[in-house]
Structures are given as structure tokens and as C-alpha cells.
Image (cartoon, rainbow, N blue to C red):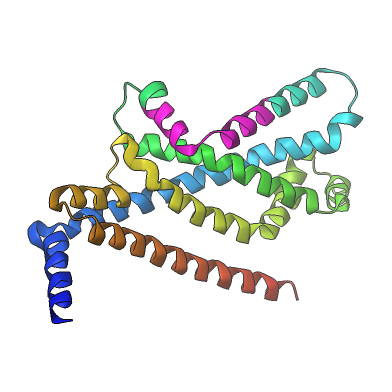
Amino acid sequence: MAEWFDSIRSQFILNFIEKNRWRYLWTGLGNTLYITFFAVIIGIALGTVIAIIRSTADRNLSDMHPGPGKSLLKFVDGFCRLYLTVVRGTPVVIQLMIFYYVIFASSRNSELIAIISFGLNSAAYVAEVVRGGIMSVDIGQTEAGRSLGFNYVQTMWLIVVPQALKNVLSALANEFIVLLKETSVAGYVAIKDLTKGGDIIRGATYSPFMPLIAVALIYLTLVIFFSWLVGKLERRLRNSDH
């Protein structure tokens, strides 16, 4: 048993203490949280816009009279459908590499590219979540807004969307957790995220166990913490409904 503890201790010192290798994990954690935070903001903002377009088309397109407005809505809705199909039908790591090596090939701001890539990926999933929330809001809310003198856009932004976001807030919080784990592929485009930090340590020490376990434990701790926050949020929302 003493030999086992000595071995673990020596491995810990080799992987994390010597040459301050723990800094790779610390820096990687910061980059992971940075990318995730701003990607979620992009995802929620763009996803909400797409959800409004999709729900508007679902509810109104068949009843609209032929004209420029209907043609424009049909075109934009078709573009959104295509976007959702492509993004949800391809792996996020492939999308990331396309953005880095093809679309933004002349740029080497890998963090910004990752934020855009993960944000656009997240928006496709957020859009369906928010669209479900919008469709769950009673149509009478829209009619009430119109009766108060609001136009359609004002009714959506001031009355319908706030209620929809409240209904799906916990799902959006869970999207943050999912995206946090998805960013583990950021190392494919030379970003020193948490996973890449562990990989750098592993490459320097030729000891895979400690770095990989450390990365896994950090991700697990983050997920448990954010899941706890989501649980508190859900309870608060349930209490506010009573």
C-alpha cells in the first residue's frame, strides 16, 4: 500500500508540480469557460431570432395573402430550416474545422473562431427549444397584444418571447452544460482548452493516467456545479408560478 501511495504521489508531482504543469489545466479551464460563455450568448440570441421566424411561419404562413411579405417570410423560413438541418446533421468538430481551416483560413484568432463556430452550432439547438416555448404560449396572448395596439414584432418581443423564455429557461441553462462539454474538441484547431492542457501534460510526461483523470474530474465538477445551479433555477421558477 505504501508503495502505491508513493507511486501516486510521484506521478502527481511529475504531472502537476514539476515545471508548474498545473498551469496548463488552469489556462485551459479559463479558455474553456470563456469560449462557452460567449458561444452561449451567440446561441441564445441567434437561436431566439430563428425561433421567432420559424414559429411565425408555422402560425401565419398558410393564412397570409400572396405578396412580398409572404414570399419573404417563406424564403427566410426556408433558409432557417436549411440552416437547422445542416448544423444539426453534421458533427460539431467538423463545423469547427471548416470555420478554422476554410472560412476563416486567413485568421489565426482561434478563440474567436471557436466562439463563432460553437455559437452557431448552439443556436440551432436553442432555436428548437425556444420555438417550442413560443408555440406553448397561448395564442390569446398574441391577440391581447394586438388589441393593445402593438404590431406583430412588438407583441412577440414584449409579450410572447419573455413568456416563452421563462418556460424554457432551464432547458437553455442545460444547453450551457452541453456546450461546455462540446468545447472539449477545441484542441483540434490549436486552442489550449482544458482538454488540450491535459494533452500537453501527457505529451511532456508520457504519463496519460493523471492528466486525463484530472481533466475528467474538472469537467465532472463543473457539470455538477452548473447542474446544481440549474436545479435551483428550476425550483425558483416553480415557486414563482404559485
Q: Position of residue 131 (x, y in %)?
A: 71, 45
Most common secondary structure along the magenta stretch: helix
Specify the quadrant of the image occupied by residue 71: top right
* Quarter holding residue 58: top right
Q: Which quarter of the image is occupied by the C terminus? A: bottom right
**Residue at the image point whose x is 31% and y is 55% from the top:** 29
Residue 155 pos. (x, y %): 77, 45
The reply, left or right, for residue 32 in relation to residue 211 is: right
Q: How many numbered marks appear?
A: 0
Rendered residue at 46%/44% (across/down): 39
Q: Is 9 one of the magenta-colored residues?
A: no
Question: How far across and down, in percent of the image, does residue 99 sit?
Answer: 42, 28
Q: Which residues are magenta?
A: 79-100
Q: Is residue 190 above or below residue 161?
A: above
Q: Is residue 95 magenta?
A: yes
Instruction: In this rendered view, identify the residue nearer to me: 56 or 186.
Output: 186
Q: Residue at x 28, y 47 (%)?
A: 196
Point 46% across, 40% down: residue: 118
Which residue reaches farthest bottom?
1
Q: Nearer the viewer, residue 164 or 33?
A: 33
Residue 138 at x, y percent in the picture: 85, 54
